[in-house]
Image (cartoon, grey):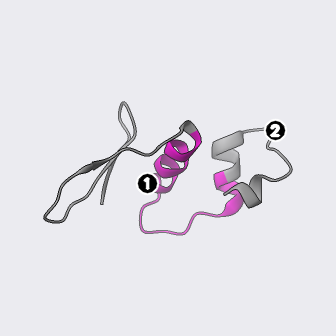
Amino acid sequence: MQIGVLGAVTAHRTDADPTELAPAGLRLRGLLARLALDAGHPVGTSALVDALWGQQPPDTAGNAL
């Protein structure tokens, strides 16, 4: 899978069917972009919560991931 983060966040399959996959929703695109920044490495919950909600995450942020 190839993730594009310049401009709109996009995902493209890299197998025989290179269809563009459009992640639905702003938060899902943000999550995908944040994971793509550390591709191949684990990203902790606190880093994801901070990237998606900033200084004031909801109480259920961990479960929302």
Dot 2 amino acid type: Gln
Residue shown at 76% from the left, 52% from the top: 61
Kindly report the distance in space between the C-alpha atoms of the residues bearing marks 2 and 1. 23 Å
Question: As shown in the figure, which amino acid type bears the numbered disc 1?
Answer: Ala
Q: Residue at x 55, y 49 (%)?
A: 31
Q: Main secondary structure of the magenta part?
A: helix
Q: Which residues are magenta?
A: 27-48
Q: Which residue is mark 2?
A: 56
Residue labelled with disc 1: 36
| Residue located at (48% from left, 51% from top) | 32
Residue 9 x/y as whole percent:
40, 39
Outermost residue toward the left in this view: 16
Callout 1: few (<14), some (14-19), or many (20+) C-alpha neighbours within 10 Å? some
Nearer to me, 54 or 61: 61
Is residue 25 shown above or below 49?
above
Residue 2 image-quadrant placement: bottom left
Q: Residues within 10 Å of mark 2 (few under 14, many from 20)?
A: few
Q: Is residue 57 left or right of residue 45?
A: right
Q: Nearer the viewer, residue 2 or 38?
A: 2
Q: Is the residue 51 above or below the residue 39 in the image?
A: above
Res. 16 image quadrant: bottom left
Q: Is residue 23 magenta?
A: no
Q: Position of residue 50 (x, y in %)?
A: 70, 46
Closer to the chain start, of discs 2 and 1, is 1
Query: Farthest residue in the top direction?
Result: 7
Q: Does residue 31 appear to the left or right of 53 in the view shown?
A: left
Q: Position of residue 54 (x, y in %)?
A: 72, 39
